[in-house]
Image: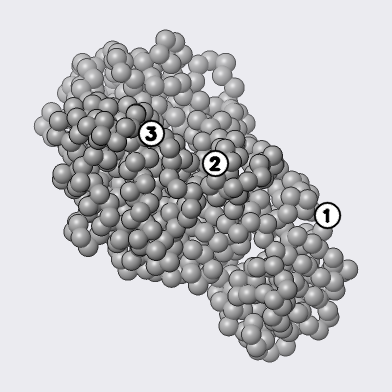
Amino acid sequence: MSLRLEQSWTPGDGHGAFHLTLVNAGGEDLPAARLCYSSQTRLAEGARTDGGRLVRTFANHVEIDLAAPLPAGGTLQVVCDGLTHPPKNRTQGVMAAWLELPGGGVRVLEVGDLVPPEGTPRGPVTDWPEGRIDVPLGLMPWPARVEVDGFGSPPLLIPLHAAAAPGAAVAALHRRLFPAAPAPFALAGPGTEVVAEADPALSAEGYRLAFSPDRITLAHPDEAGLRHGLIALAQMTHAARTDDRFAFPQSGTIADAPRFGWRGCHFDVARNFHGAGTVLRLIDILAWLRMNRLHWHLTDDEGWRLPSRAFQGLADLAGTRARGTETPPQYADGPEGQSGSYTEAEVAQIRDHAAALGITVMPELDIPGHVTALLHAIPGLTDPDEPAGSYHSIQGYPNNALNPALPRTYEVVETLLREAAELFPGAPLHVGSDEVDHHSWQASPAALALAAREGLSGAAELQAHFLRKVQGMVRDLGRGMGAWDEAADGGGVDPDGTLLFAWRSKEKTAELIAAGYDVVATPGQAYYLDMATGAGWDAPGATWAGIVPPEAAYAYDPAEGLPDGPGRLVGVQACIWTEHLNSVARLNEMVFPRLALIAEAAWTPADARDWPRAAALSRLVPTL
């Protein structure tokens, strides 16, 4: 491209400065224009810009009127001095940029990587270790107990009787994941018979495989156990046919059952939209890894992706970021912005596809914070006497929380929760509750009057008041409630029927259990798959929770050091946040194969886990 933005960072006061060089390699002179860019390393309040006048910031979006034209063959320098935090790698600078010309035209800038100060360690980006295969079984996650006497070539497997229909479903799953690979199962013809036998003495979702030369017996206590056993057979067959490091058991047994009942993966489609096809593919991979929950993060400041009948057009309006609107482009959008939401038919397809594979989809409506898109789409949800910009979220969004003092707030929330319950029958409803700024509502006369009447102090207690009302709505719908760990703050919600997701620290799990909550461990320091895997400048990703190399993610034991009492650890969950992950290529770069390591933490007993083996086996997992 003839227009390019090169960028570098220098440390200094206020976390340093971005140095932006606009390069015009074309033959056309450009008049003084407005530079628009997005970066998660934002400009702090009071930031100084040289080479242009700062005219607007909105979360990650920045607009600067340039001080001079950009002649053909020339360059223009802009310095943005005073950042919210120091960038830690090449992906934490400008993500997208363009020029808006005086006549209304737009010119996209190709954006170069953020260049660090001289002498900064550049890499390497974490290389995945080769690992070690001692037992030639291509199984991920690894079973609880393996007592196999011999190995050989994989036979064609013929599921019989009770295993026939589930075997066909697993064969279809394998075909979707590996369309060019040999099929593991056939429904008739020569091959080794797979006979299913019910055994109620086995643990829930468990299975036992007994191998002999002419038959495999698959004992199971329930439908899930039968499916998991068939997937294990398909995995071993696939690995033995496609990789000469692996073989198929000839005799002996494999006995298996999950360590945790909740084996989840969170997927954020609000920050960056990903279509139904990507979600369906992710569900197939979760089933292959014997995970059983998809936590679907459908709403946030940047987008509302869930359809609504009561509020027609909500998803279209609140699912769009565009130039010239209240919600401008963010992240790597570019000037075209972004638009995306799911239809009811797509939601049903995703929900039903997951259910057929034993996966429950839990929708998240992130409230009371993270609702910028909703506030822009539905009128009457703000206190008219609350000054604009009286508080900002950690992501830079102004006044981005539902006001707990307004009756309209509860009318809208109750309607949206009811619609979500109808779209996801039987599933728990996750109500967010994270990252409400401690200044929230402190300049709202309506909220302050509520606080005075109810004896509440500060944003945390106002949020707890709001969430207890929401909890009543969820109970009236006959559902359990999920929330992030902040739902325990400010007096908290009732632990009964509530599942909290501990994300802020590894220690949060123990704190919440001691407070009486059932907990899913999902700490950013171990299980957030958008975190960079290496400390070098060239390693992509977020770093607010630290660097999460694969071995550290695998080594974390969520149950270590937990207290006895009234709450309990019910499972673990990977989190896919998508600020950096705006494409399938980016998802694959960051999510895999780390997702397989967390699947093993959720399934495999602690004493059966082995890092070199897991490093090798995780490479077998398909990607999106």
**Residue 621 location in percent, x, y?**
62, 57
Using the image as rendered, state which of residue 508 and residue 237 is in the foreground: 508
Q: What type is the residue that disc 2 sits on?
A: Ala
Mark 2 or mark 3: which is in front? 2
Q: What type is the residue that disc 3 sits on?
A: Ala
- Residue at the image position 79 percent from the left and 62 percent from the top: 145
**Residue 368 location in percent, x, y?**
32, 42
Q: Does residue 236 appear left or right of residue 498 in this picture?
A: right
Residue indicated by mark 2? 515
Query: Helix, strand, or loop for circle 2?
Result: loop
* Mark 2 or mark 1, earlier in chain: 1
Residue indicated by mark 1? 134
* Mark 3 or mark 1, earlier in chain: 1
Is residue 155 something that shows in the picture? yes
Query: Helix, strand, or loop for circle 1?
Result: loop
Q: What type is the residue that disc 1 sits on?
A: Asp
- Residue at the image position 44 percent from the left and 10 percent from the top: 12
Q: Using the image, tell me which numbered label, if any, was put on residue 460.
A: 3
- Circle 1 packing at 10 Å, graded few (<14), some (14-19), many (20+), is few
Q: Is residue 19 above or below residue 345?
A: above
Using the image as rendered, state which of residue 176 and residue 367 is in the foreground: 367
Residue 474 sits in quarter: bottom left
Mark 2 or mark 1: which is in front? 2
- Circle 3 packing at 10 Å, graded few (<14), some (14-19), many (20+), is many
- Circle 2 packing at 10 Å, graded few (<14), some (14-19), many (20+), is some
Quarter of the image for the N terminus: give it: top left
For the residues marked 3 and 1, what is the alpha-carbon distance in whole angstroms?
A: 52 Å
Residue 286 sits in quarter: bottom right
